[in-house]
Each structure stands twice: as C-alpha cells, then as structure tokens.
Amino acid sequence: MTNLINLQELKIRRIGASKVESVLSSIAKLNRIQSLELHLSTHPEYVAFPTLVPFSHCHHLRALSLWGKIERLPEDPYHEFPPRLTELCLGDSMVGPEAIAILEKLPNLMSLSLSINSYMGKEIECSTQGFPQLRMLGMDWLESKEWEIKGGALPRLNLLHIEDCYNLKKIPIGLRFVASLRVLELCDMSEEFWDRFHRGEDAHEIRCIPSIVNIRR
C-alpha cells in the first residue's frame, strides 16, 4: 500500500487484530491521503485501534471515519491528530468521558458524527470555546443522559442532529447560547423526551432556532 504514493481516498473494511498495527503504519506513509475510512472486524473484545497518532503524519488528511474500539484518543489535538482534519466520524469507538474534552479542542474540525457506541460517557459537556469551527454535529444511539453546553461553546454550529438517544430526556441545557444554530433535527427519541418537548418545558432553549425538524417513526 505504501507504493501508492498518490492515493487520496482509501476505505478498508474487516481489519483483523493481527493487521491493525501494520495498516496504521502503512497509512502513516501515505503523504497525500485526504479521505480515510477504516472498519475493524466485528469483535471489539479482540480488536481495537491501539492509537490514532500515526494519522498525525498524514498532513493532507481532511476526512477520517473510524469504526471500531479506540484504546486511547490522542491527548494533544495540535500534534497527535491530522493537522488539517475537518471531518470526523466515529462508530463503536467506546471512548470514555474524556473524549469530548479532547475532540472539542481540534482547531479545524467542522463536522463531527458520533454514532452507535462511539461515546460511553453518561454526561456530555461542551465547554466555553469548545469546538471553535464546528458547523455540523450529529449524535445517534448514544447512552448519555445529560448534555450541557456552556456559553461560548460551538460558536459556528449550523446543524445539530440527535437521533435514537433514548436516555436523553430533554433538549441540551444551554442550547440557547448557540446563536449560530439554524437547524435542529430530532429523530426517534424517548417518550419522556417527546412529552417534555411538546409541553414546551425547554422552549427557552430552542425559541431562536429557525428550523426544528422532529421525526417520530
């Protein structure tokens, strides 16, 4: 794979435990890669991404999609992540409560999707000045029960999509601080969530959002 020096887009599926490190090592040498999607085999107890640091060598990587358990997220968003990363999608990653504090510091991230079993924390907190460039945030099938957005977080967010987060009982606290938000999409939430939503208990959080789409299948 390292002989493909002009490769810009790559997808690899069903990566087994014995191949993970060699795949990561090879990708680190793909100097022109811009879009990367990796899927581990379906046994998280046996296979995981041990680290994401090799991707930091991919200086042109903009879109990264990872499906499979991540043993440890890089702690330094400026030197251990791809420097030009703008899109990130995680699924089955099983990262802990520290993940949001790390991801919200990525300086160029514009799109983030946290899919099924990607984030295992019971609480989500977006801190002041967190996610400075994020335009699109999607969360689905997460176990989190509480979500708080501090004033000054997500200053450029345009689209927020929340789907199948059945433990989340209400609109994120502090969503009213996100003045840039234009579209809020809510899909297949819990009955408790919908009851509270239709009673207008969180109306103060969403009254300034131009478009609110709610779907109950």
Image: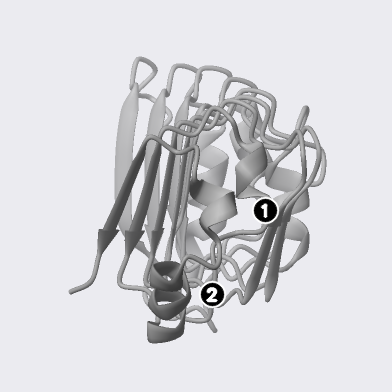
Q: Which mark is residue 168?
A: 2
The residue where tag 1 is placed is: 51
If the image is split into quadrants, where does the C terminus sit?
bottom left
Three-letter amino acid code of the residue under disc 2: Leu
Identify the residue at image location x=68%, y=76%: 122
| Quadrant of the rendering where the N terminus is positioned | top left
Rendered image: mark on residue 15 = none
The residue shown at (70%, 41%) is: 104
Protein image colouring: one colour
Q: Residue at x 41, y 23 (%)?
A: 34
Q: Is residue 114 left or right of residue 38?
A: right
Please provide percent x and percent y for residue 116.
43, 69
Task: Using the image, determine if residue 55 lies above or below residue 42.
Answer: above
Q: Is residue 5 visible?
A: yes
Alpha carbon distance from label 1 to label 2: 30 Å
Horizontal relation, residue 191 to residue 29: left or right: left
**Residue 191: image x %, image y %?**
38, 84
The first of marks 1 and 2 along the sequence is 1
Q: Is residue 23 left or right of residue 28?
A: left
Could you tell me the amino acid type at mark 1? Thr
Q: How many residues crowd around disc 1 within 10 Å: few (fewer than 14), some, or many (20 or more)?
A: some
Q: Residue at x 61, y 23 (%)?
A: 108
- Name the image quarter holding residue 21: bottom right
Q: Is residue 135 left or right of residue 74?
A: left
x and y percentages locating residue 99 in the rendered image:
71, 56
